[in-house]
Amino acid sequence: MPAGSSAAFGRNGKPVGLDAQYVGRLPCCHCGIRSMKLPGRQGGVCIPCYADECAAAGRRAATAGGWVAASFVGDPCLACGSRAVDANGWAFWCNSCEMQTAVALPPQ
């Protein structure tokens, strides 16, 4: 995990993330191909599926006239296009451009 990363916190002040025992060990709940890296709506998801969930939530919010927090998580990296990305259940980072972001559960 890169220096300076921190956990995301939910509305109740408790940490939001994927338990370390599942990160990189169990398959993604959506695709079943890649390993879990981040929290998803139905369980742990891989980085591409997390990005898809966030994009879908953003589209739903836009059509409803609402707002949703921006997501910078993706594979390849949305900043530099590198595939040298990783996550640890709490944070996402790119090893090429060193962009880092804390992650949280997508809006329900």
Image: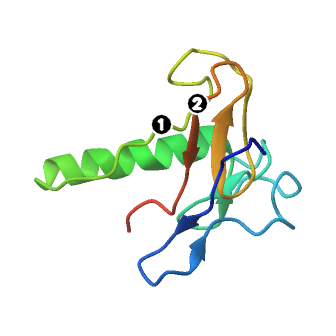
Above or below, comparing residue 98 to residue 56 in the picture: above
Residue type of the residue flagged with mark 2: Met
Mark seen at residue 99: 2
Q: How many marks?
A: 2
Instruction: State the separation of the CA atoms marked 1 and 2.
Output: 9 Å
Specify whether 73 is left or right of 96: left
At 73% from the left and 26% from the top, the residue drawn is 95
Q: Which residue is mark 1?
A: 72
Counting from the top left corner in percent of width and height, residue 63 is at: 15, 48
Disc 2 is placed on an element classified as loop
Question: Dot 2: few (<14), some (14–19), or many (≥20) neighbours within 10 Å?
Answer: some
At 81% from the left and 57% from the top, the residue drawn is 23
Q: Give the colouring mode of the picture.
A: rainbow
Disc 1 is placed on an element classified as loop
Residue type of the residue flagged with mark 1: Phe
Counting from the top left corner in percent of width and height, residue 56 is at: 37, 46
Counting from the top left corner in percent of width and height, residue 22 is at: 83, 64
